[in-house]
Amino acid sequence: MKSAILTDDRSVEISNRQRPVPDNDELLVEVDACGVCTTDVHMYSGSLTVGYPMTPGHESAGEVVAVGDAVGDYEAGDRVAINPSIPCHECQACKSGRENLCQDLTSLGGAAKHIIEGAFAEYVTVPAANAEDIGDLDYRTAAFAEPLGCCINGVDQIDLTSGETVVVVGAGAIGLLLTQLLRASGAGTIVVSEPVEQRRETALDTGADHVVDPTEEDPQTAIPELVGSVDVAIEAVGLPDTIEQAYELTGPGGRTLVFGVPPEDATVEISPFDVFYEEREVIGTYSLTPDSFARAVTLLRNDRLDVDTLVTDEFALDEVEQAFEQMEAREGLKKIVYPNA
């Protein structure tokens, strides 16, 4: 089978490898679609340390072609989305239902303590417990289950109350997924801050009530003038400046969700007195849980979100490096790779 292998920083090799054989509790899945994530790009650029050689890719869906001897819930021909996060099920975090914080987490092609071969390949093996039946949902849409599951986990953290005002800082694919999810979850007013005009237009088309261009006007002035007090601000970029900006946008009792992935050594400055006196919260969110993944598949199967609008570029497996480079240049929105095209 063919795999896209990172052999070093900014080096991708399309290699022929032996097709894997599923263990007793695993499925062998023919990968029909795999989304490109910023994490993949960080691995490619070397800004996220991984052991080379490795195969990235963790937003995938495909057809089951073989099952392990102990698998009873799936058979060849079934169509599934793949949850790449494989928890140990034994640590305290797992036992408390927070599998995303597993102390011994394994990821199929993503970022975790242990990384195994990912889905930028024609075939991949996955524990049967990490597959979710997608029925007749098309594979490209099903590949959004992983990022949408992460968004669901994030929205769960903010304890959203119906009618609240929410600001989303950043309208990349994740910011736009969050915007749609917030609308479906009962947000009252949604404002999106984004410098790229096309992304602002897409935000309005997919659920935002207002958009702001932060290069033309100061969000900390413009947004309160538009909507008054902000209950929740979600930072979906991963930069210290925009995290501080999101925090400053919230009022008393406000919550700031750090969704974007900041540099590991980054710091931000906030007022501890505001945290105390105004009961303001700064909340983190990481990855997804089996529950949020299953809920994501349900939303996609019931057509609750428009993900087609987010797909701007599609690639064959041997074009994956081009997809990474477009992501780095902030060209377009979601990239989808078809390993078996």
Image: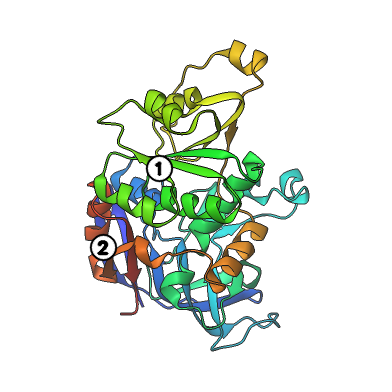
**Mark 1: secondary structure:** strand
Front label number (2 vs 1): 1
Please tell me how crowded label 1 is: few (under 14), some (14-19), or many (20+) other residues with Cα within 10 Å: some
* Frontmost residue, 274 versus 220: 220
Q: Considering the image in quadrants, where does the N terminus appear?
A: bottom left
Q: How many marks?
A: 2
Is residue 166 in view? yes
Give residue 264's position: percent from left, percent from top. 44, 31
- Residue at 63% in and 73% down: 128
- Per the rendering, the mark at residue 210 is 1
* Frontmost residue, 35 versus 44: 35
Looking at the image, tell me whether mark 2 or mark 1 is earlier in sequence order.
2
- Per the rendering, the mark at residue 336 is none
Instruction: Please name the amino acid that badge 1 sits on.
Output: His
* Frontmost residue, 198 versus 5: 198
Is residue 22 in view? no
Give residue 2's position: percent from left, percent from top. 33, 74
- Residue at 56% in and 24% down: 251
Q: Which residue carries the number 2 mark?
A: 13
Instruction: Please name the amino acid that badge 2 sits on.
Output: Glu
- Residue at 54% in and 28% down: 229
